[in-house]
Image: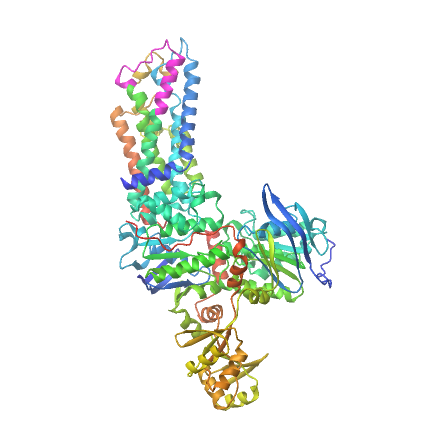
Amino acid sequence: MPYLWPPPVITGTIGGVIEAAGLTKRYGSTLAVDDLSFHVEPGRVTGFLGPNGAGKSTTMRMILGLDNPTAGDVRIKGQHYRDLNRPLRTVGALLEAAWRHPGRSARNHLRWIARSNEIPQRRVDEVLELVGLTSVAKKKAGGFSLGMLQRLGIASALLGDPEVLLFDEPVNGLDPEGIHWIRQLMQALAAEGRTVFVSSHLLSEMSQTAQDLVVIGRGKLIYQGTTEDFIDRATHQSVRVRSPQLAELREALTRQGAQVDEDDGTLTVSGMDSDAIGELAFATGATLHELSPRRGSLEEAFMQLTGEAVEYHAGDHGAAPETT
Amino acid sequence: MIEAHGLTKRYGKTLAVDDLTFSVEPGRVTGFLGPNGAGKSTTMRMMLGLDNPTAGRVTIKGKPYHELHHPLRTVGALLDAKWVHPNRSARAHLTWMAKSNRIPQRRVDEVLDIVGLTSVAGKRAGGFSLGMSQRLGIAGALLGDPEVLLFDEPVNGLDPEGILWIRKFMHRLADEGRTVFVSSHLLSEMALTASDLVVIGKGKLISQSTTDEFIARATENTVKVRSPQLDVLRGALTDASAEIASVDDGLLVSGMDSAKIGEIAAANRVVLHELSPQQGSLEQAFMQITGDSVEYHTGLETEAEQVLSATAR
Amino acid sequence: MTLLAVERIKLFSTRSPWWCAVAALVLTTGFTALVVGNADEEFPATVASTQFGYSFGLAVIMVLAALAVTTEYRFGTIRTTFQAIPNRTAALLAKTTVVALLSLVIGEIVAFASWGLSLLLQPQADLALNSTADWINVAGVGPVYAFAAVMAVAVGILVRHSAGAISLLLIYNLAVESLVSLIPNIGDDIYEWMPFNVANKFLTGAGASNAGRAAEAGAPMSTSPLSPGWALAYFAGVALVLLGIAIASARRRDA
C-alpha cells in the first residue's frame, strides 16, 4: 500500500463546508424535506434539531448520498458526496450504530472499511485506541453493548481522519462518562478546524455541545444561527433578586415599569436587565443578596419555535383515575 | 416505599451487585445513576423479582415482589421497551397484561390515550419506532395505576417534545404521592427530573442523598459578581478573606455566599450589576464523586470485562 | 381461569399458531392423500393408513409449542409475564395448558380431516370406525399431540432458544429414538420404552386398525409391551415429568 498518510489539509473555506440548497425529498405524497437551504461552518459544532419526523435523518442520508433528493442538492466542500474521491477521508459519519455484522470482530469491521478507502491499517488500531475499544478489538461485535457499538461507530467515522463529521444521536447508549467523553471529542474535533454536524433529541445535552444550530420542522428550515441567539429570540430573560429590603425594592421596580413576581422571598423580574436593577437597588438603598440573570433554556426556545411544526402530540393527561 | 437491604447478586465470579442498601421515598422522583455495568439493571430486575438475589433482599411496600397480589396494580415498570412480541398489536399486548391482573379493559384504552398511541393501537408492535415502543412500555407501566413506578432510561428514542412530556409526567406522578424510581445516563436530564439520587458504582452504593446535596458535596459553590466599581469590591472581599478569581467581565468569588457578598457591597457603597450563585452541574459532581470512589473503574472497562468474560464462557 | 385467558390472548394475538395449524393440516392430509390415494388391492387403505401423516403434524405441533415459549424469551416478554404474574409455576402451567388444548384441537381436526379425505379418495375401502382400536387410532391423535406439545413446551422452557429447542425436538423425534434400537444387545429393550414409540402403541395398539393389510406394508407397529391405555399414561407421564423439571428450573433461574 504505497499511500502516504498525510493528515488532511484543512482548506480555508469561508462559508459552508456543507451546503444544502433547495433540498427536497418526497416519499409518495409526503414531503419529508421541503426546500431546505442551510450551511454548516467549519471549526464549530453545529446541532441539527427537529421533532421526530421533521426530516433530520432523511437530510443526513441525502448529505451522504444514500438517498437522492427529489429536488435541490447538498454539497460537501462544493462536491456531491458520490463525486468525492475516497469519501471516508473527507466525511466520517455515525448514523446508526447497529449497522454492523454481528459475527465480525470490531477490528475486522474497521479493517474492511479502511481497505475500501485505502486508509492504512495502523489507523484501525489508532481509532480503536481513541474510542477505548482496544481490549475488545478482536471480539465479535454481536456481543457488544449499545454503548460499545456506539464507540465502534464513532471509530469508523474517525477512520479516515475526515474534515467533516456527521453524528446522528451520538450519545445513544453511552453512560455518563461516555457522554462527557463524546462531548469533549466533538468540541476538540471542531477546535481542530473540522466541521461537526450533530443531530440529537437531547436538548439539555445539545445546549452544552453545539455553538450553532440548524433547526427544522416538517421538513422546513425554522432557524439557522448561533445557539445563544436562538434562545434569546424565543425566551425572555428574567432576573432573580433577593434582598432584605424586598418590599422597598419591589415597589421601586414596579414604579420603573418592570414586571415583578414574588415567590418565597424571591423576586423574578422581567423587562429590566440586571445592571439596571443593580443601579436601582443602590439608589433605593436596598442591599442585594442575589441578583442573577436567568436565561431561558434551549428546550423552552425549541418548544416555542417548533410548536406548530410538531406532527404528533401525545395526549396530555395525568395518570388516569382509579383502576377498579 | 422501595427498600433494599444488603442486596447482592453474583454471576459466577463477578459481583454485579454488592451489599446494596438504600430506600426510595414516595412523593419524589428518585434518580438511579451509575456507569454502565454498575449493576443498575440487575438491581431493577431484582426489585421486580425477575432475578433472584444471591443475598439480601429488596421489598416494595414491605413485601418482596412475588408476594404482591396483582403486582401490576402496585408496581409499574418500564425496563426495556423492546420486551414486546413484534407480531402482537399494542392493544393485544396491553390486553393480556391487564387481564392477568384483573384490570378492566377500558383502562387499556385509557393508557393508550395517555401515551398518544390510540391511532396505532391495532398495529404490530414490531413496526414501531423506538419512541413509539417507549410510549407503549410507559403505557404498560401505567396500566395498573400503580403507586410505585420504575423506569429504565425512559427518554430513550423520544424526541424533545416526548422528553419534556415524560419529565413533566414523572413530576406529576410524584406530586400525586407515588414513588418514582428512574435510572438514566443523561445527567443533564436527570438534574431537571430527579429530586433525590441513588448513585452506585461497581455494584456498591456510592451515595444516597438529595440531588442538591449531591451536587453541593462535590462541586464548589461560587458566586459570580459584576460591578462598575469592581476594584473597590475586590479589595473589600479580599479583606473579608474570600477567594477571588477574575473572569471575563467580573469576579468569581468562592468561600462566601451571595448574601454576605451583597452585604459587603452595600457596606462599601458599591453598585452591583450581577450577583449570581453558580451551582456546579450534576455531571461535574458525578464525575468527581464516582471518580473518587476507590472501587470504581470506568464504565467502559467494566463493560469490556463483561464482553470478555461472556465470550470466554 | 384468568391466567388461561391471558395465555389465550397471548397465543392468538400473533399469527404463528394459525400458520402452524394450517401447516399441520396441509402436511398431514397431504401425506395421507399420497398414501391412501395410491392404495390398491395389494396394499388396501386401512384406518391406520389414513393416519399415515400423523408424525408430520406432530413435528409441526412441537415446533408451535416450543415457539410459544422460546419467542417469549427471544423478545423478552417472559419478563413482562413474570412481572405481571410472579408465580412462575402458575404462569407456565397456564401457558402449557393453553398450548396443549390448542394441540388437542388441531390433532383432532387433522386426524378426522385425514380420515374424511381418505373416505373420499377410497370410497370402496373399509374405513368405517367400527372398533375401539379404530376410534383410538383416529381420535387418539389429539391427546398424543397435546402431550407432545407439553414436552415441547418443557424443552422450550429449558433451552430458551428457538433454534436450539426446535432442533433438539425434531432430531430426537425423527432420528434419535429410532437410532437407539441400533445399540447392540440392549438397544431394542430401551427402544421399547422410548416415549414416541410408546405413543405409537397407544394409537395403533396390536394392529387391529390396520386389519386387512400386511403388517410390514402398513404403518410401522410399535414394539412397546404396554397396553394402549398404559401407553398413553406412560407418554403423558414422561411429558409431565419433563414439564415438572422445566418449571422447577424456571423458578430457580433469573428471568
Side (left or right) of A4 relative to B165: right
Total marks drawn? 0
Closest to the observer, A98 or B210: B210
Q: Is residue C113 above or below residue C70?
A: above
Image x and y of residue A82, in percent: 70, 48
Q: Position of residue C136 (x, y in %)?
A: 29, 21
**Foreground of the two, B88 or B20:** B88
Residue A64 visible to an observer of this rendering:
no
Q: Which residues are magenta?
A: C109-134
* Residue beneath the point at 43% across and 31% down: C19
Q: Nearer the viewer, residue B25 or A251?
A: A251
Residue at 59% x, 41% y: name it.
Answer: A28
Residue A104 horizontal side relative to residue A81, left or right: left
Residue C12's image quarter?
A: top left
Magenta span dominant secondary structure: helix
Q: Nearer the viewer, residue B246 or C70?
A: B246
Residue B245: x percent and y percent? 55, 82
Q: Determine the image quadrant of residue A47.
A: bottom right
* Image position, residue B202 (x, y; %): 42, 63
Say which residue appears at 42% left-offset and 54% top-offset.
A316
Q: Quadrant for the N terminus of chain C, please.
A: top left
Q: Is C241 situated above or below A287?
A: above
> Any magenta on residue B162?
no
Q: Quadrant of residue C28?
A: top left
| Left or right of C113, for residue B253 | right
The color scheme shown is rainbow
- C131 drawn magenta: yes
Tell me if residue A290 can be seen.
Answer: yes
